[in-house]
């Protein structure tokens, strides 16, 4: 079978590695990057061309030319690193990368962003794809700036904003189980499965979905205290205890784009 386009995945973590395997199964030529030696070996064992690329504050290390050259689409799925280093200039690192994307004339950039570009509020606002990002947090503002950099510098861009990622053994209940005094009991959950996000990315690559911004949401908007109590029972974990009183801060992420 003739191979399809060549797709580069910058950041083969929990989401990106699974995407690389799925695209390979569909006969795409796939290149992937990681800073983890074990993950690089796993990529190679699955016939995915692996590159060790590291984007630091002032320099990009690794064979960036070999990774970017002749790509038909680039998926950027790298963590901002703002929790470990709040002062990190994520948007600058993205712009530094995008200069090379322009040099190698990559026709389509798919950026895995975050719903943290939207502010949590007491009135629980609803945000759809054409809602203007309004984050006031340091992290949110930096991710907004990264989105803007890609939008301005790419030939064509698609911004995908996944909600909280779940799948297989990954679920926030594992962090909340047995805890007490948890805030925002009546705020809605905003969650999406890894399979759903990677299906969105694949449909963007194939052209089945053509939109500048996509929200990744697959799970119902149940209130937190109900959802996580049920999740604890399903996982056989101790039920978390939420605050009985207090203000609820939250938001409801909505997608206007159908995946079916």
Image (cartoon, rainbow, N blue to C red):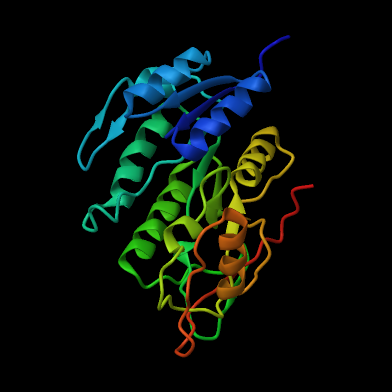
Residue sitting farthest toward the bottom: 245
Q: Quadrant of residue 233?
A: bottom right
Asked if residue 52 can be seen in this view, the reply is no
Q: Is residue 202 left or right of residue 42?
A: right
The residue at 49%/67% (across/down) is 133
Residue at 43 percent across and 75 percent down: it is: 182
Between 134 and 240, which is closer to the camera in this rendering? 240
Quadrant that contains the N terminus: top right
Residue 34 x %, y %: 37, 29
Count the marks: how many?
A: 0
Q: Position of residue 119 (x, y in %)?
A: 46, 73
> For residue 157, which quarter of the picture?
top right
Vertical relation: 246 (above or below) 257: below
Residue at the image position 44 percent from the left and 64 percent from the top: 176
Q: Is residue 184 rendered to the left or right of residue 95?
A: right
Residue 192, position in %: x, y? Answer: 60, 54
Q: Residue furthest right?
A: 260
- Write the residue at 21% across / 43% down: 57
Does residue 241 appear in the picture of this structure?
yes
């Amino acid at each position: 079978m003739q191979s399809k386009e060549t797709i580069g995945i910058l950041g083969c973590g929990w989401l990106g590695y699974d995407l690389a395997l799925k695209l390979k199964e569909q006969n795409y030529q796939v290149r992937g990057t990681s800073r983890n030696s074990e993950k690089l070996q796993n990529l190679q064992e699955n016939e995915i061309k692996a590159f060790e690329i590291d984007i630091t504050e002032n320099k990009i290390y690794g064979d960036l030319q070999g990774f970017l050259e002749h790509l038909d689409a680039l998926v950027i799925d790298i963590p901002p690193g703002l929790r470990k280093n709040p002062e990190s200039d994520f948007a600058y690192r993205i712009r530094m990368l995008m200069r090379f994307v322009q040099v190698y004339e990559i026709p389509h950039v798919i950026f895995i962003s975050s719903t943290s570009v939207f502010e949590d509020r007491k009135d629980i606002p609803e945000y759809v794809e054409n809602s203007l990002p309004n984050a006031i947090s340091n992290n949110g503002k930096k991710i907004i700036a990264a989105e803007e950099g890609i939008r301005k510098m790419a030939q064509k861009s698609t911004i995908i904003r996944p909600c909280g990622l779940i799948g297989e053994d990954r679920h926030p209940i594992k962090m909340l189980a047995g805890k007490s005094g948890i805030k925002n009991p009546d705020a809605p959950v905003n969650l999406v499965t890894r399979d759903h996000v990677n299906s969105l990315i694949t449909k963007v690559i194939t052209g089945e979905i053509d939109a500048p911004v996509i929200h990744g949401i697959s799970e119902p908007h149940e209130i937190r205290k109900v959802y996580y109590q049920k999740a604890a029972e399903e996982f056989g974990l101790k039920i978390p205890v939420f605050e009985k009183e207090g203000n609820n801060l939250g938001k409801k992420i909505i997608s206007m784009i159908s995946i079916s």
